[in-house]
Image (cartoon, grey):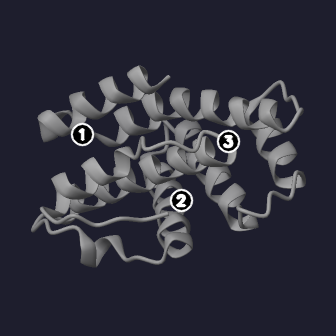
């Protein structure tokens, strides 16, 4: 699983022109499905769909996870499904980003330096996505030194910043 995310990271961080809303939503969704499934398995739970997995995860009442985290996952999922309506899709993933930033206690608009607002928002989406992936991995019991958010933060800010 780390190899899939590593490829996703390398592709997007090596050349920022690959960093796009659709790539993050579509490829990221596939990687989040695996992490969410791993979390449920670690808890002895199962679900057939992503939305059902979110509901089951919310009911698991993990002490490491705020209920708003599950709302963020729902917003991400809805953004993935809104391929036709670009304006709605944008609002949904921006909601996802705002929830994750609030839960993590940072402001991506202040943290990420980019003069182009569209580019800055995509970077915020990418960082929020990576932090979400890491959190799912963590609550599934994978406590190791694999923290791709550090690479993303260093790339986007030029500073060594840590979250968790």
Classify mark 2: residues with Cα within 10 Å, few (<14), some (14-19) or many (20+). Answer: many
Task: Tell me the quarter of the picture where residue 115 sits.
Answer: bottom left
User: Which residue occupies 53% across, 38% down?
Assistant: 80
C-alpha gap between disc 2 and disc 1 = 17 Å
**Where is 95 relative to 85, above or below?**
below
User: Which residue occupies 35% across, 32% down?
Assistant: 23
Which of 32/77 is in front? Answer: 32
Q: Seen from this angle, which residue lies furthest front?
A: 144
SS class, disc 3:
loop
Residues at marks 2 and 1 touching, judged by CB atoms closer than 8 Å? no
Classify mark 3: residues with Cα within 10 Å, few (<14), some (14-19) or many (20+). Answer: few
Res 77 seen here: no
Classify mark 1: residues with Cα within 10 Å, few (<14), some (14-19) or many (20+). Answer: some
Which mark sits nearer the N-terminus, 2 or 1?
1
Residue, disc 1: 19
Query: What percent of the width, then of the height, locates residue 17?
Result: 14, 37
Query: What percent of the width, then of the height, locates residue 136?
Result: 62, 45
Relative horizontal placement of residue 76, taking residue 64 as reference (left or right) = left
Relative horizontal placement of residue 8, taking residue 114 as reference (left or right) = right
SS class, disc 2:
helix
**Where is 81 relative to 11, above or below?**
below
Which of 15/61 is in front? Answer: 61
Which of 61/143 is in front? Answer: 143
Residue, disc 3: 141
Mark identifier at residue 96: 2
In this rendering, which labeled residue sits more in front, label 1 or label 3?
Answer: 3
Which of 71/62 is in front? Answer: 62
């Amino acid at each position: 699983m780390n190899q899939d995310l590593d490829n996703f990271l390398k592709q997007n961080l090596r050349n920022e022109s690959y960093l796009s809303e659709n790539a993050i939503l579509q490829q990221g969704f596939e990687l989040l499905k695996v992490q969410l499934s791993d979390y449920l398995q670690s808890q002895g739970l199962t679900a057939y769909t992503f939305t059902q997995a979110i509901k089951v995860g919310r009911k698991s009442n993990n002490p490491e996870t705020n209920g708003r985290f599950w709302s963020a996952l729902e917003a991400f999922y809805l953004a993935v499904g809104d391929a036709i309506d670009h304006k709605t899709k944008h609002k949904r993933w921006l909601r996802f980003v705002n929830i994750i930033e609030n839960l993590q206690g940072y402001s991506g608009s202040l943290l990420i330096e980019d003069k182009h607002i569209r580019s800055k928002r995509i970077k915020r989406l990418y960082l929020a996505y990576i932090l979400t992936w890491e959190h799912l991995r963590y609550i599934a019991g994978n406590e190791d030194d694999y923290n791709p958010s550090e690479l993303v933060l260093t790339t986007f800010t030029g500073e060594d910043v840590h979250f968790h």
